[in-house]
Image (tube, helix red, strand yellow):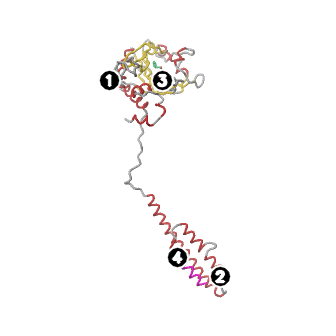
Amino acid sequence: MEQRIRALRAQMEERLSRIDSRESLAAFWQEFLGKKGSVADLMKGLGTVAREDRPAMGKVINEFKVMAEQRYQECSERIGQLEMAARNRREEIDITLPAKKREMGTLHPITIVKNEMINVFLGMGFEVFEGPEIEDDEHNFTRLNVPKDHPARDMQDTFYVSEDILLRTHTSPGQIRVMDMEKPPIKVLVPGRVFRSDSDATHSPMFHQMEGLVVDKGITLCDLQGMLDKFVKQIFDADVRTRLRPSYFPFTEPSVEVDVSCFECGGKGCGLCKHTGWIEVLGGGIVHQNVLRNCGIDPEVYSGFAFGIGIERIAMLKYGINNIGLLTENDLRFLKQFKD
Ligand code: PHE
């Protein structure tokens, strides 16, 4: 038996020298210390040893076992260190490596134009107000002097949520909301999303408008034209001129359509202005007396002007975009062109 133990010791050293992983370490345990391992085997063999030799033999086997366990432990620590070193090597951060580049996003052209428009008007002392996109009939139509069954309701194809709740068809309900909250002098902008059941190359069921409202003593159409004149010069070109054409909106009287001289051809006539020399950019007018009255403002004392600008339209004209769909498709090849 002693001879066998000697042989096992030699075998153990040989095995130990080859352990290089958790797996081979586990195999070592199985071979020497496992249930069916050498130590267990030796213990079983103890039965065949002469009774008087058993205590001494048992001691030898036990020493062998303790040694195997010790060697196992040492080896396990060595493997642990190797693993840690390998992990450190793997996770080492090379600070000389160029950083992963995060591409900078760009503002959407609608946001760019919206901000630009707001900036122009902020310079004239306007404040910004935002109203809800889901409106009630009262604010979107009735108090804007468009009673139920009024033919003017057909001017805008409305998305109804229920009989009295709808997706606002314009930012004009913002006028009512502002006049309910504030007394003149009022000078506000109401930018926002609006919705109409309409879709082609220049119309989208969702689009953006910017409402403007000024109410004070002695406001006239000249104030409207003067302000818009300044606006288009800053947005398009310094020598762009404006022209007012009579129009109709139920909430303004008189109502006007505002054209700008074509900034592409300077008014001579080209494809952009459909050879008229003028491009229509917005609607507006003098706030209807009924609208002022509906908001508790005395039309004998105060007057105001209002206008509504389509932001998509301004962006399309400014950037030469020929299809409104491009503004919602989010094709990066398109959007990337608006890097400042
Ligand atoms: N709300 C009108 C539209 O959407 C535009 C407008 C606003 C006209 C304010 C006059 C005054 O067509």
Q: Determine if the magenta segment contains residue 64.
A: no
The residue labelled by disc 4 is 14
Instruction: Give the distance between the C-alpha atoms of the residues marked 3 and 4, in whole angstroms.
Output: 87 Å
As drawn, the residue found furthest toward the left would be 239
Q: Is residue 334 left or right of residue 196?
A: left
48, 137: nearer the viewer = 48
Q: Quadrant of the N terminus?
A: bottom right
Instruction: Place residue 337 in its image quadrant.
Output: top left
Instruction: Give the distance between the C-alpha atoms of the residues marked 2 and 3, in whole angstroms.
Output: 99 Å
Instruction: Place residue 65 in its image quadrant.
Output: bottom right
Q: Earlier in the sequence, mark 3 or mark 1?
A: 3
Q: Earlier in the sequence, mark 2 or mark 3?
A: 2
Instruction: Give the distance between the C-alpha atoms of the residues marked 2 and 1, in whole angstroms.
Output: 109 Å
* Percent x, y of residue 114: 42, 29
* Element on which disc 3 rests: loop
Residue 238 is marked as: 1
Within-10-Å neighbours for mark 4: few <14, some 14–19, many 20+ = few
Instruction: Give the distance between the C-alpha atoms of the residues marked 2 and 4, in whole angstroms.
Output: 25 Å
| Amino acid type, callout 3 | Thr
Residue 22 sits above or below residue 122 on the image: below
Instruction: Give the distance between the C-alpha atoms of the residues marked 3 and 1, in whole angstroms.
Output: 28 Å
| Amino acid type, callout 1 | Ala
Task: Label the magenta part by its dominant secondary structure.
Answer: helix
Q: What stretch of residues is rendered in magenta?
A: 1-12
| Amino acid type, callout 2 | Leu
Within-10-Å neighbours for mark 2: few <14, some 14–19, many 20+ = some
Q: Nearer the viewer, mark 2 or mark 1?
A: 1
Residue 320 is marked as: none
Q: Nearer the viewer, mark 3 or mark 4?
A: 4
The residue labelled by disc 3 is 171
Q: Nearer the viewer, mark 1 or mark 4?
A: 4
Q: Earlier in the sequence, mark 3 or mark 4?
A: 4
